[in-house]
Image: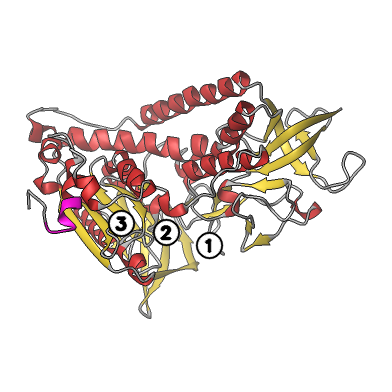
C-alpha cells in the first residue's frame, strides 16, 4: 500500500533521526527508513561504543597510577568481557531513547532497505521510496514531497588489504573483540587510528601506528600533531610516519600477521597479532536508487548545494554520504538545515570553520577554525598565543599536566581565527572556543571572560592573554 509523506529520510543515524525530529517539530509528516538500528554508526559502531571503551581504558590506566594519588590498589586487571558488557548497556540505553523520541514525535519508522524510484505511476518525478522490509513482508511504497538521503558511511580499506575479521580488522570488528590482542598494527594515524592507539596501549596492548603522511593526525595544527606524537611515544606507542603500506606483503601465520611498508625507498616489516585498518570511511551510495535520479556523485560522495539539495531539488543529502567533515554533530546540523530549508524557514548555510572537532584519545584534542598554517596560507596576518597545562593547578590536581591551548588570531582585525587544544578534558572545553568563533570574538573578549579557579578552562583565558604577550602565569 502506498503512503504519502511530506518527508522521507533514508537512514536513521545521527543525521537522519535528528532531521526527523526537527521535521516533526515543524509539522511535517515524516518517515524514517532504517535497514539496521536507529542511531546508526555513531550509536552502534562509532562514537558511543568507542568512547565507552576509551573510558574503561582510562579508568584502568588511572587505577594503575593509584599510588601517585595515595590510593593503593594491590591488583589491577582488565575484565574485557565486562568492559564490553558496559559498552553494550550504554548503547542499549541510548537506543531505547532514540526509539522513544521517534514515538514521541509521531515519526513512522520502516525497518528495511529504502530505494529511490525513478518517475512512475506514483510520481512524475524521481523520489518515491520502495522499502524492502527486513521481516520479508511485501514492499512498502512511500510517496514523499521531499527526501533526505542520510545513509552514512562504512570503514574504507586499502586495495588488496581485505578485512577478514580475524587477522585484519576495521573499527567495526575491533569494537566486537572478545579479548584483547597482545599486539596490534594500526594502519592509519588519523583521528580514529589515534583513538584506538591510545585506548589499546592504555589497556596494555603493544601498539604500532603506521601512517602514510609525514605526521599523525595530519589535519590538526602542526604543534598539536607534534605534541600528540610525543605523548603517544611516551605511553609506549611505536609510530612510523611517511610509510606507504604494501598490501601485497601481508602474511598471516600461526597467531600473527605481518605487513611491510615502504619508507624513504626502503622496506620495513611489522609483525603483530592483528592489523587494524583505519584509513577513512566511504559513503554508502550503492543500492539506494541513485541511478534512477539525476543526482551527481563526485569522488564517491553525493554533490549538494549550501542547503544540501542535490541536482534533484526535492532530494537532499546530509552527513557522511556527502563527504566533508564526517562527524556526528555535523550530520545533525546538516539535517536540521536541510529540514528548515524544506519548511521555508530560511536557515543560514553552515560555516564549517565554526565546527568544533574532537579526538577522544588520552590526551584529548579539541579544535575549531583555522590552524596556524591554514590561516597563513589564506593570507591572514597571524599572531598566536599558547599556554601550557603545566601551569594550571587543576591539571596538576588531575595528574594530567601535559598539553596546551593555542589561539590563532588575525593581527589586523584581532579576530580569533582558530583555537587548538591538547590535554585533559579538552573535548569538554572546546565549545567555549566554538562560541567565540560564532560571535567573532577577539582574544581580549575571551581573556576578559573570568574563568573560575581552579579549572582547566583557565588555560583558555591565559592563552587569550598570551596572544598579546599578557599571560599572567607564564
Check if residue 408 falls in the magenta segment.
no
Residue 99 is situated, as x and y percent measured from the top left of the image, at 58, 23
Badge 3 density bin: few <14, some 14–19, many ≥20, Cα 10 Å: some
Q: Secondary structure at mark 2?
A: strand
Q: Secondary structure at mark 1?
A: loop
7 or 132, which is in the foreground? 7
Q: Nearer the viewer's eye, disc 3 or disc 2? A: 3
Residue 104, located in which quarter of the rendered image? top right
433 or 43, which is in the foreground? 433
CA distance separating discs 1 and 3: 41 Å
Q: Which mark is residue 158?
A: 1
Residue 430 is situated, as x and y percent measured from the top left of the image, at 31, 44
CA distance separating discs 3 and 2: 38 Å
Badge 2 density bin: few <14, some 14–19, many ≥20, Cα 10 Å: many
Check if residue 468 falls in the magenta segment.
yes
Residue ID for mark 2: 187
Q: Which mark is residue 53?
A: none
- Of mark 1 and mark 3, the one earlier in the sequence is 1
Relative to 107, is 283 above or below?
A: below
Where does the N terminus fall, quadrant-wise?
top right
Tags 1 and 2 touching, CB below 8 Å: yes
Residue shown at 34% from the left, 58% from the top: 220
Task: Tell me: 414 left or right of 190.
Answer: left
Residue ID for mark 3: 415
Magenta part of the chain? 463-469
- Of mark 1 and mark 2, the one earlier in the sequence is 1
Residue 116 is situated, as x and y percent measured from the top left of the image, at 77, 45
Query: Residue 414: in sight, yes or no?
Result: yes
Badge 1 density bin: few <14, some 14–19, many ≥20, Cα 10 Å: some
Amino acid at each position: 500500500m502506498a503512503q504519502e509523506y511530506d518527508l522521507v529520510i533514508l537512514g536513521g543515524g545521527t543525521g537522519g533521526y535528528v532531521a526527523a525530529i526537527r521535521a516533526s517539530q515543524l509539522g511535517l509528516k515524516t518517515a524514517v527508513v532504517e535497514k539496521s538500528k536507529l542511531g546508526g554508526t555513531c550509536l552502534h559502531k562509532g562514537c558511543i561504543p568507542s568512547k565507552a571503551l576509551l573510558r574503561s581504558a582510562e579508568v584502568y590506566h588511572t587505577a594503575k597510577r593509584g599510588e601517585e594519588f595515595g590510593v593503593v590498589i594491590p591488583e589491577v586487571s582488565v575484565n574485557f568481557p565486562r568492559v564490553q558488557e558496559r559498552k553494550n548497556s550504554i548503547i542499549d540505553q541510548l537506543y531505547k531513547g532514540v526509539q522513544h523520541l521517534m514515538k514521541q514525535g509521531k515519526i513512522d519508522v520502516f525497518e528495511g532497505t529504502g530505494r529511490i524510484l525513478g518517475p512512475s505511476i506514483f510520481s512524475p518525478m524521481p523520489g518515491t521510496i520502495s522499502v524492502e522490509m527486513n521481516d520479508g513482508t511485501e514492499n512498502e511504497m512511500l510517496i514523499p514531497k521531499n527526501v533526505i538521503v542520510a545513509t552514512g558511511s562504512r570503514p574504507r580499506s586499502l586495495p588488496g588489504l581485505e578485512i577478514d575479521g580475524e587477522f585484519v580488522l576495521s573499527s567495526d570488528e575491533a569494537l566486537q573483540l572478545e579479548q584483547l590482542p597482545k599486539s596490534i598494527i594500526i594502519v592509519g594515524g588519523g583521528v580514529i587510528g589515534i583513538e584506538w592507539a591510545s585506548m589499546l596501549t592504555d589497556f596494555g596492548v603493544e601498539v604500532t601506528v603506521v601512517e602514510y603522511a609525514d605526521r599523525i593526525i595530519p589535519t590538526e595544527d602542526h604543534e598539536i600533531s607534534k605534541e600528540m606524537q610525543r605523548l603517544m611515544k611516551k605511553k609506549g606507542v611505536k609510530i612510523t610516519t611517511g610509510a606507504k603500506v604494501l598490501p601485497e606483503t601481508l602474511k598471516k601465520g600461526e597467531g600473527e600477521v605481518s605487513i611491510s611498508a615502504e619508507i624513504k625507498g626502503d622496506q620495513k616489516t611489522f609483525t603483530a597479532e592483528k592489523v587494524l585498518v583505519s584509513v577513512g570511511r566511504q559513503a554508502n551510495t550503492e543500492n539506494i536508487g541513485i541511478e534512477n535520479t539525476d543526482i551527481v556523485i563526485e569522488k564517491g560522495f553525493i554533490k549538494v548545494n549550501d542547503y544540501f539539495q542535490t541536482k534533484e531539488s526535492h532530494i537532499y543529502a546530509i552527513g557522511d554520504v556527502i563527504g566533508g567533515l564526517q562527524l556526528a554533530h555535523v550530520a545533525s546540523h546538516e539535517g536540521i538545515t536541510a529540514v528548515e530549508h524544506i519548511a521555508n524557514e530560511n536557515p543560514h548555510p553552515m560555516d564549517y570553520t565554526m565546527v568544533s572537532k574532537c579526538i577522544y584519545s588520552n590526551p584529548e584534542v579539541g579544535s575549531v577554525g583555522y590552524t596556524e598554517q591554514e590561516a597563513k596560507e589564506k593570507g591572514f596576518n597571524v599572531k598566536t598565543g599558547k599556554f601550557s597545562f603545566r601551569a594550571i593547578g587543576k591539571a596538576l590536581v588531575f595528574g594530567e599536566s601535559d598539553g596546551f591551548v593555542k589561539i590563532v588570531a588575525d593581527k589586523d582585525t584581532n579576530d580569533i581565527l582558530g583555537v587548538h587544544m591538547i590535554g585533559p578534558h579538552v573535548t569538554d572545553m572546546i565549545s567555549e572556543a566554538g562560541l567565540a568563533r560564532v560571535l567573532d570574538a577577539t582574544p581580549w573578549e575571551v581573556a576578559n571572560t573570568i574563568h573560575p579557579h581552579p579549572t582547566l578552562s583557565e588555560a583558555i583565558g591565559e592563552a587569550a592573554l598570551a596572544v598579546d604577550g599578557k599571560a599572567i602565569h607564564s
